[in-house]
Image: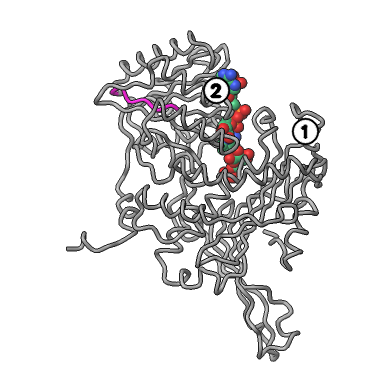
């Protein structure tokens, strides 16, 4: 019986069937923010355009603006025109915008929440969304408990028996272990675990999901995916943008809490974990949790970490201001905009293999990649000069923007001499697939509306990640001001020294 054959990719194959959201209302908090404008509203339109939202879908925005419904629809229209991936279609937009409502208010204001509850219920009745509501918290993290408490107080969190409620919580979930546990206690008091969707949008990226396909659907990589062959792993998330208009959110949070605690440690978990029993949420999360539990911090955090703050410089042919001169940033801020850390993973597969993680704003260019750098061969039969242009073999998963995978290895240079030089074998999504990659938020919002949890970290993963980061953050508080680095360069000197001490260097993506 074919269905009985164990096949870990079966769940993925099943996903080729169209998955369409059922009737529902999505309530979006923080609708005027950067994330909502650039990603969430365009993703909702793209889902509608692809026919993955039901015709009666409702969208309610909430923010501190004196807007009428049509003002919100106008803002959403501009966001969609500017950032959506699919072509603009008037009929799709009309249907979507007919289901849009806006409620102005402060999150602490009970009256505003009561108005929100009335608006959602009226829309539900108008559009026939069956009492199914999802609440998306695209807000500064300190406001998450307030909203969850208000959802309970206003009765919005409570559903009739036939309907569902889901809450989507943006990252970072807390700012340390204790606050993550406190936040979870608040959330847990209002929503059952299966209704809580902690978003880490990196898990929605095709290239990140492909890590599992690459490893577990091929015979080629897994046998060498271990300490016997791999010298070290580098995980890089570099951005060329600065803090932009997000001072209020970013200052005091910093690069490590903003993206290492979540995106980069999730990438580490996907690289380090063992093959899950299946692609169900429980099976994947269990393996990621084992990997995160095995993470070890080096003893000397001073030499195993680096952090920096961007100074003025040149980027894309223009001069840019330093972090301390950005609007809304205190001139004595010690928030880091660059962070690098060295971690170990104490498992049979990885013992002794360092994982170097780095992220920063205002770096040379925008690129995210995972590079597995292999041990060098003895090169016994080659003269030193024959291999001087050869580096270590590497397998690079190019997460973005040039999505694909590169295998780098040495090859004979044509000619009479036996000379070896590095060459690349490339897989590029654009060339290999006719199907375009959906934007991560498109995939994740759809999963929320369908109620499909595998791409959402659970509380245990969040807590394990804070356990890794907390001692580093504590060390940095004692260490004083972060080192300045020039905008447009590749981070502070201490980050380069971190690898140089180990006889290695950062890849230049
Ligand atoms: N921006 C990004 O690229 C990404 C962001 N995220 C996450 O998304 C979340 C939001 O980030 P981002 O959009 O960048 O933040 P912004 O600072 O750009 O937006 C914050 C939003 O929160 C609203 N808000 C703030 N205080 C209140 C309040 N007291 N009452 C009502 N509304 C309030 C603001 O509304 P108002 O107009 O009233 O001020 C605004 O809509 C964060 O958790 C962040 O980590 C995750 C991945 C990427
Ligand atoms: O989570 C975040 O991610 C964005 C970068 O996202 P990407 O998908 O473009 O890599 C980052 O700018 C932001 O600071 C952070 O909160």
Q: Is residue 448 highlighted in magenta? A: no
- The picture quadrant where one finds residue 22 is top left
Disc 1 to disc 2, C-alpha distance: 33 Å
At 39% from the left and 17% from the top, the residue drawn is 120
The answer to whether residue 82 is seen in the rendering is no
Is residue 184 shown above or below 429?
A: above
Closer-to-camera residue (388/96): 388
Extreme residue in the left direction: 1
Residue tagged by mark 1?
333
- Mark 1 lies on a secondary structure that is loop
Count every numbered label the image shows and give the total: 2
Q: Viewed as shown, does residue 7 lie left or right of 180?
A: left
The answer to whether residue 381 is seen in the rendering is yes
At 61% from the left and 59% from the top, the residue drawn is 355
Tell me where the magenta segment starts and ends, as one range. Answer: 130-135
Q: Position of residue 441 (x, y in %)?
A: 48, 39
Q: Position of residue 197 (x, y in %)?
A: 43, 36
Could you classify mark 2 by the number of other residues whose Cα lies within 10 Å: few (under 14), some (14-19), or many (20 or more)? Answer: some
User: Which numbered disc, 1 or 2, marks the residue that appears first in the sequence?
Assistant: 2
Label ID, residue 75: 2
The quarter of the image holding the N terminus is bottom left
């Amino acid at each position: 019986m074919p269905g009985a054959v164990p096949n870990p990719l079966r769940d993925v194959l099943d996903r080729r069937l169209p998955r369409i959201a059922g009737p529902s209302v999505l309530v979006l908090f923080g609708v005027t923010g950067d994330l909502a404008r650039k990603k969430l509203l365009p993703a909702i339109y793209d889902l509608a355009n692809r026919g993955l939202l039901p015709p009666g879908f409702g969208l309610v925005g909430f923010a501190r603006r004196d807007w009428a419904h049509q003002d919100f629809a106008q803002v959403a229209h501009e966001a969609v025109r500017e950032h959506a991936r699919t072509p603009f279609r008037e009929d799709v937009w009309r249907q979507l915008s007919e289901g849009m409502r806006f409620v102005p208010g402060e999150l602490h204001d009970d009256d505003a929440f009561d108005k929100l509850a009335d608006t959602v219920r009226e829309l539900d009745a108008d559009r026939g969304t069956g009492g199914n509501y999802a609440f998306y918290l695209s807000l500064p993290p300190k406001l998450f408990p307030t909203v969850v408490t208000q959802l309970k107080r206003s009765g919005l969190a409570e559903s009739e028996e036939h309907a569902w409620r889901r809450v989507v919580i943006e990252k970072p979930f807390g700012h340390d272990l204790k606050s993550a546990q406190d936040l979870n206690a608040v959330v847990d008091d209002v929503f059952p675990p299966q209704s809580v969707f902690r978003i880490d949008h990196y898990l929605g990226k095709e290239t990140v999901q492909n890590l599992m396909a690459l490893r577990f659907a091929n015979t080629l990589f897994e046998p060498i995916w271990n300490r016997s062959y791999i010298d070290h792993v580098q995980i890089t998330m570099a951005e060329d943008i600065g803090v932009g208009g997000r001072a209020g959110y970013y200052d005091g949070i910093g690069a490590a809490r903003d993206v290492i605690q979540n995106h980069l440690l999730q990438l580490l978990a996907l690289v380090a974990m063992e093959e899950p029993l299946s692609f169900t949420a429980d099976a994947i999360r269990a393996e990621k949790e084992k990997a995160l539990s095995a993470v070890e911090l080096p003893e000397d955090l001073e030499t195993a970490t680096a952090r920096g703050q961007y100074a003025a410089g040149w980027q894309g042919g223009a001069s840019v201001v330093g972090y301390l001169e950005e609007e809304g940033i205190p001139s004595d801020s010690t928030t880091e905009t660059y962070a690098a850390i060295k971690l170990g993973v104490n498992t049979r597969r990885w013992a002794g293999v360092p994982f170097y993680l780095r992220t920063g704003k205002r770096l040379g260019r925008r690129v995210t990649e995972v590079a597995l750098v292999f041990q060098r061969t003895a090169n016994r039969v080659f003269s030193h000069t024959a291999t001087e242009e050869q580096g270590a073999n590497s397998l690079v998963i190019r997460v973005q923007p040039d999505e694909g995978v590169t295998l780098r290895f040495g090859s004979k240079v044509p000619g009479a001499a036996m000379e070896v030089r590095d060459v690349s074998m490339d897989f590029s999504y654009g060339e290999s697939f006719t199907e375009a990659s959906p934007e991560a938020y498109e995939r994740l919002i759809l999963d929320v509306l369908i109620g499909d949890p595998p791409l959402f970290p659970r509380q245990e993963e969040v807590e394990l990640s804070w356990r890794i980061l907390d001692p580093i953050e504590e060390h940095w508080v004692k260490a004083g001001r972060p080192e300045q680095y020039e905008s447009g360069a590749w981070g502070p000197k201490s980050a380069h020294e971190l690898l140089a001490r180990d006889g290695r260097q950062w890849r230049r993506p």
